[in-house]
Amino acid sequence: MTHRPTSWSLTTIVACLASPLIGGVDQPTAAAETSDVDPRPSLDFRRMLAVFADPAGPGPDVVARLNRLGYGDDRVAVSSASGWAYLLLGPDDPAVDDVVATLLNRGFDQVSRLHTDGGSLPRIPTRDLLVQIAPDAEPMLLEGEFEVLDVDFAGLPGLTRVRSHARTGIEARAIAAGLEARPGVEFAHPDAIYWATRWGGAPNDPLYPQQWALNQANDHDLNAPEAWAMTTGDAAVRVVVLDSGVQSSHPDLSVEPGEDFTDGVGDGSPNTACDNHGTAVAGCVAATIDNGLGVVGIAPTCRVVSGKIFNEIELIFFCLPFLESQDSWTVSGISWSASSGARVTNSSWGGGAGSAAVTAAFASTRAAGVVHFAAAGNDGTTTLGYPANLATVNAISAIDASGGLASFSTSGSGTFLAAPGASVLTTDRTGADGYGGSDTTSIDGTSFASPYAAGVAALVISADPELSPDQVEQVLADTAKDRGAAGYDPAFGWGLVDAAAAVAAVFDTTPPCIGDLNDDGQVNGADLGFIIAAWGPCGDCNADLDGNGLVDGGDLGLMIAGWGLCP
């Protein structure tokens, strides 16, 4: 097997993870501060594998064995767990499942995908399992079937560490789930290798203490630190900012290139000196955390993407407080948000009678799985503007630092949630561009409440990517801090959006129900029929429970181990 080297070093990528992905301390150098392009690479866990070669076994160590297969040191990083290494697959490598099969055939003891389990950081299931035996269980419950490594592990009565025959992470999880379903077993799960945030208190972004919207003593805030203790987001979750452009070279934004729909050509960056609004909006969502610069967004590891559908108007050398678009630009931008793979959009604009085509675009993309947020308006009335008044768009009103409805905020029947929108400290275009002379700005408007809510939705989706728009909205409504009249009211909607409560509500701790192939909540004869029908070679089917490319006795054993009602 021949492998082309990738254009990056895995060692470099792992070292760089501290800032864009893990949220650790990353003080930029002077060169990095002045660079127009963020040099730090992103990392796709879906193209990484954890590979194990038992150190007690014959032959060279895991790195040497991977090197012999053509994976150089720029592709392999040693894990601190004995016998394990991480393998980064490049764009020219075969499909991940094919690489797994090849490595297993070459005699590696275990190959695991990097499971994120709803969070932003990986967990790698190993072949060893931690099993909690009930006090009244049969003493010989595990002996003979597993190699028992430790009893009363770490001094905890009944906690038993055993070694399974699993050769993939999926198989290890399946075996553990089958064990957990047995009488006398309180829980069972792989002894997973996991990555955790190097969390050292408040972010080192120098203006973070001034960002009342994220954290303040009176709790009229988004509970950002509590949310970040669980996740700072997932780089695969994108929020499209439908606006006047986002500065793609901004050193304090987690931003990916977007599209310009305003008859311009480019990546969605501003075109004129007046195109300032979108960059300020984007900072509320995903200003970078712990990079020693400026501010931080509510979902700092998620990515903002610019859908430039507006130009800000310049008249006689003055920037007017208006945006200019065309229905075709707006429809194109909204539709592209879905086709680009984004899960969330933000529209910090509104007014006028609206457009049937734009309305249809919002409805179509929501049906395709995109959650839309829009600013309620800034006229202080109780009539929501367009597009915030659409049933397919979530209208966000603004509160001030004391928790009251901001004096400028529009609200009314249909308001979904409230979020901080007064004196919001966020990113500004750099240098002489933007609203002021620095790279940050303090600004008022529901334009900035809306992206905060959109960013919380991105955190929720990072925690559980399988959620539908309805489910995301339900989580946000159910977990909001009630404000105003009890329950729903037209000023605050369901209340002040609460990032920590929303994320905590969706992290899935339910163990997988291995063998429930028809999703009816139990493993029974109907599922056995699927196993029999698929018996033999199986390139990609759900009956292949242990992931070895065959439906055989191993899969049948896993199904029998989990027989009965799912937990």
Image: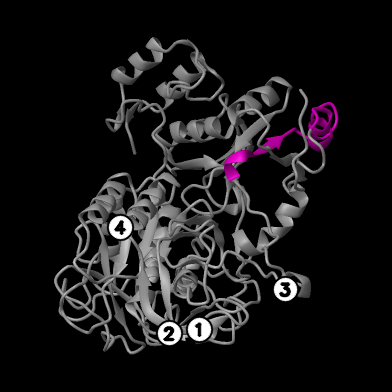
- In-front residue for pair 324/8: 324
Say what amino acid the circle numbered 3 marks. Thr
- In-front residue for pair 267/393: 267
Residue 435, which numbered label?
Answer: 1
Using the numbered discs, state the Cα–Cα distance from disc 3 to disc 1 in whole angstroms: 20 Å
Q: Residue at x 84, y 28 (%)?
A: 68
Say what amino acid the circle numbered 4 marks. Asp
Label 2 vs label 1, nearer the camera: 1
Q: Residue at x 76, y 30 (%)?
A: 3
SS assignment at label 3: helix
Label 3 vs label 4, nearer the camera: 4
Please report whichever mark, 4 or 2, sits nearer to the chain's N-terminal start: 4
SS assignment at label 1: loop
For mark 2, what is the residue? 443
Asked if the residue at tag 1 contacts the one at tag 2, i.e. Cβ–Cβ closer than 8 Å, the answer is yes
Residue 547 shown left or right of residue 465 in the figure = right
Using the numbered discs, state the Cα–Cα distance from disc 3 to disc 4 in whole angstroms: 38 Å
Q: Residue at x 70, y 28 (%)?
A: 109
